Amino acid sequence: MRAWSAVEVPTIPATPSSYRIPERVSLVTTNDRALTPVGPEQGTAGMYVCGITPYDATHLGHAFTYLTFDLLNRAWRDAGLDVEYAQNVTDVDDPLLERAAATGVDWRELADDQIGLFRSDMTALRVLPPDWYVPATSIIHEVIDLVAGLASSGLVYQVEDPEHPDWYFRTAQAPGFGAESHLGREAMLLEFAEHGGDPDRPGKKDALDCLIWRLERPGEPAWDSSLGRGRPGWHIECAATALNRLGTAFDVQGGGRDLAFPHHEMCAAEAVVATGEPFARAYAHVGMVGLDGEKMSKSLGNLELVSRLVDAGADPMAVRLALLNHHYRGDWEWTAEQLGAAQRRLDAWRAAVRADRGTSAVPVIADLRRTMRNDLDAPTALAVIDEWSSAVLAGDGQDEEAPGQVAAAADALLGVELA
């Protein structure tokens, strides 16, 4: 499936050797919890980011996640790497089917409508599209093949349920299980129950075993397979999508912090058993965005939507700046005042880059590169441009090329278009 409209990334000047900047991008990754270089020194970096379940519009928590990995994509490209980026769309899953049933809309129509809205939101926010944008319904055959391969490991079985003998995977027996989340068993069970798992289902061999193929229920979509007519489980969908596009040991798997367990841990377990190789080298997780004292989520209904803000007249670049004013690993709460502050910042930046001249862009670009390669420190990067723009608006500097160079750097590294 086509993702969304391509974004042209400007070229910015090389940083002189007299300005020391990190050669590689580093993140504080979930698996080792330390600042670690991610991506190769040269060549191609691979990234997989878990996509939406398209049953409702894109809220700011979603946008914060996809902007984070857009920053990583841009930082890698600026460091001279090619990037291979895959993202899935879980366009058949319980929340989507439940919403379709509740609204009387065909589940495929609902999914298509929400995927289209998500793509338009990402285009408005200047998020670079992935190379592969993969609906689950388009790779059913890949999931079936992956489950068949897992079956030879002896870790796949049918649950003891005479009515619905679904297929499960013995997750906790996978080599290295727990290495990404660092959770003990009791904590795993709590997280599993909270984030879409079924630890209490009777007939399972272990409470942490995860569903990989759900047999057909009346009124639900299903596909023919050697496993019986049914549909994929959640984790196996992402494992198949990533393995068949990025291969094993790609550089970064990303998503919201709520995906660390069970989703990312269980994807990795399935992939390791299937291939004998690591799934991703590093895992990066984004903090939660709150509203009215709670995590912003579709289930709670406490949402601020990208499309609603834009339809009300917000400049998408102001929305982007409001999000970038928070470091990706931290939790934070959205307030309407943040959008106003972001618009004032955007106005000041645009006024500065329209000036005939300004202070040199060379140290500005060097500082931007340094901050973005150091754990995607977007708030500090914004402050760098604030300082430069304030100086320009005060009449400082005689460099006629500087305004255009800073505008190009803001676009290339931060995705903020100032033209």
Image: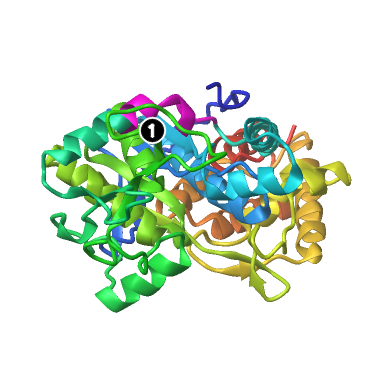
The disc labelled 1 sits on which kind of residue?
Answer: Arg
Q: Name which residue lies at 47% across and 50% down.
A: 372
Quick one: 188 or 232, which is closer to the camera? Answer: 232
Quick one: 227 or 42, which is closer to the camera? Answer: 227
Q: Position of residue 143 (x, y in %)?
A: 33, 33
Residue 163 is left or right of residue 369, and the answer is: left
Quick one: 157 or 280, which is closer to the camera? Answer: 157
Quadrant in which residue 207 is drawn: bottom left
Quick one: 370 or 154, which is closer to the camera? Answer: 154
Q: Name which residue lies at 46% across and 59% down.
A: 196
Residue 40 is left or right of residue 59, and the answer is: left
Secondary element under disc 1, as helix, strand or loop, is loop
* Vertical comparison of 320 with 405: above or below: below
Magenta-highlighted residues: 129-143
* Vertical comparison of 398 with 83: above or below: below
* Vertical comparison of 214 with 11: above or below: below
Res 320 visible? yes
Quadrant in which residue 245 is drawn: top left
Task: Please rate how many residues cluster around mark 1, counting C-alpha atoms within 10 Å: few if below 14, some from 14 to 19, many from 20.
Answer: some
Q: Position of residue 381 (x, y in %)?
A: 56, 54
Residue 138 in the magenta stretch? The answer is yes
Q: Specify the farthest residue to the right.
A: 312
Residue 332 in the magenta stretch? The answer is no
- Quarter of the image with the C terminus is top right
- Look at mark 1 in the image and give the residue it sits on: 229
Q: Position of residue 380 (x, y in %)?
A: 55, 59
Q: Name which residue lies at 11% across and 47% down.
A: 154
